[in-house]
Amino acid sequence: SFYGMTWGNVRAAAVVVLPALAAAFLLSMGAQAVLAACGTADSLALPVLREENRVPLFGVLAPLAARVAAEYRVRGGRVALLATAATTQAGEAARALLRAGIPAEAVEVLACPAFVTMAERGTVEGEAAAERVAAVLAPLRGKDIRTLALGCTHFSHLAPLIGTAFPSACVVDGAREAGAALGQALAGTPAAEGHGTWRAYTSGDPAAFARAAAGYLGEPIPTEPLPSRIR
């Protein structure tokens, strides 16, 4: 993060620099592939990272767009792209949908910064959370939305509530699609066969991160502070 803020809420220049530093750190630890599991980092930093690094680099937007396009061909109607303010302003997420074959007039883009806050705080279930999600998505009412594309990996935690708010639409989770694409790319390697181990580094409070990660992933996640040079 950037001084405790998620990348979707900071200026574009910082989002270019910080992922580059993080990727360099991971490569120094022996990483053989890197997943930019953030729609904002994918939008703003991944092209630069691909120019500077030779290891396989994966993002969220391309696999998300591929799955959304498949749903669009079946469902028709319109697609709603939900993302952070920085991702929507960058425009790369919407362009990914167009490259996948979805016409521009069928794409509705909605910035949902409140969803990031809800996910960070763990406010992802219950009546109050459902009401908040419905209020954020209110601008999409009456627009024939049949597919909802989650362009921020924070939004995965709110996918059930988003689906409840639009019960007739298909919710496509960018995080799940990115994970599936990475799994396919790593097929046949030890990591894909379940022999890997978790190791997390955070720019925030390691104990708080470990608690949140364990809650979401269902198992303890060893967590260490990120070196100060890349915070």
Image: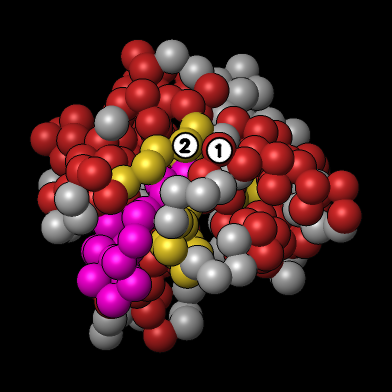
> Is 58 inside the magenta-drawn segment?
no
* Residue extending farthest right: 127
Disc number placed over residue 73 in the picture, else none: none
Residue 130 in picture, x, y percent from top left: 78, 53
Quadrant assignment for the N terminus: top right
Whether residue 113 is situated above or below residue 53 in the rendered picture: above
Helix, strand or loop for disc 1: helix
Whether residue 226 is situated above or below residue 228 in the rendered picture: below
Residue 30 in picture, x, y percent from top left: 34, 52
Mark nearer the N terminus (1 vs 2): 2
Q: Residue at x 69, y 47 (%)?
A: 134
Residue at image mark 1: 139
Residue 99 in view in this figure: yes
Question: Label 2 amino acid?
Answer: Leu
Looking at the image, residue 4 sits to the left or right of residue 143; the answer is right
Residue at image mark 2: 110
Looking at the image, residue 72 sits to the left or right of residue 176; the answer is left
For the image, the number of numbered tags is 2
Q: Residue at x 34, y 72 (%)?
A: 75
Q: Nearer the viewer, residue 155 or 27?
A: 155
**Mark 1 or mark 2, which is nearer to you?**
1
- Local packing at callout 2 (Cα closer than 10 Å; few below 14, some 14-19, many 20+) is some
Looking at the image, residue 169 sits to the left or right of residue 134; the answer is left
Q: Residue at x 54, y 23 (%)?
A: 9
Residue 174 in picture, x, y percent from top left: 43, 57
- Local packing at callout 1 (Cα closer than 10 Å; few below 14, some 14-19, many 20+) is few
Q: Nearer the viewer, residue 37 or 119?
A: 119
Q: Main secondary structure of the magenta part?
A: helix
Q: Which portion, as a residue range, is magenta?
A: 62-82
**Residues at circles 1 and 2 in contact by the CB criterion of under 8 Å:** yes
Quarter location, residue 121:
top right
> Is 72 inside the magenta-drawn segment?
yes
